[in-house]
Image (cartoon, helix red, strand yellow):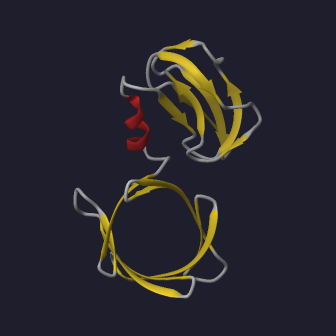
Amino acid sequence: MRLQIEIDGQSRQVQIDPADAPGLWIVRVDGNLVEADARLLRPGVLSLLIGGCSHRVVLDGDSSDPALYIGQNRIPYRVEDPRSLRSRRRHTGADGPAVLKASMPGRVVRVLVERGQEVAAHQGIVVIEAMKMQNELKSPRDGRVAELRAIPGATVSSGETLAVIE
């Protein structure tokens, strides 16, 4: 699972994969490898062992200001899952560039536009094949293709930037 997590105002790319043993997880934070042993004690409370240090983590995700509590330290956070519709809609405002990201891992089948081309809202930009299905990713708004990073035949990860619409 790949997530974009903002902790104390700093944005981090987090990749979480299960390890071979139950309860062990392989975690990459901004590309740096961390092996973690996580056990759910009860809903919202984890016992976390990282690098030989034990931590009790309490998740307060029900409030409008979510935070992790590790010991007496309160750490505000925000998680953005690149697959979620809510996070993709966040980039549809009229101010600033709109970033079109891969909603799932897959292979770029076709690029439907060129850099510099004017596009309309909901116009197809890139076609990605994932799990034997082709998915057309569309422009979130009217504008011009300022950046085009998608290359036909290339493999992309979930959340990877494919195009920027200005």
Residue 32 sits in which quadrant?
bottom right
Residue 91 sits in which quadrant?
top left
Image quarter of the N terminus: bottom right
Instruction: Identify which residue is drawn at 77% across, 35% down.
Output: 153
Instruction: Identify which residue is drawn at 61% across, 25% down.
Output: 147
Is 78 displayed left or right of 35 in the figure?
left
Q: Give the residue furthest to the right.
A: 153
Q: Is residue 81 above or below residue 56?
A: above
Instruction: Identify which residue is drawn at 43% across, 54% down.
Output: 10
Residue 82: x and y in percent read: 49, 47
Residue 154: x and y in percent read: 75, 38
Q: Is residue 140 above or below residue 156?
A: above
Instruction: Identify which residue is drawn at 42% across, 26% down.
Output: 96
Residue 124: x and y in percent read: 56, 22
Residue 20: x and y in percent read: 67, 79
Q: Is residue 66 above or below residue 109?
A: below
Residue 95 sits in which quadrant?
top left
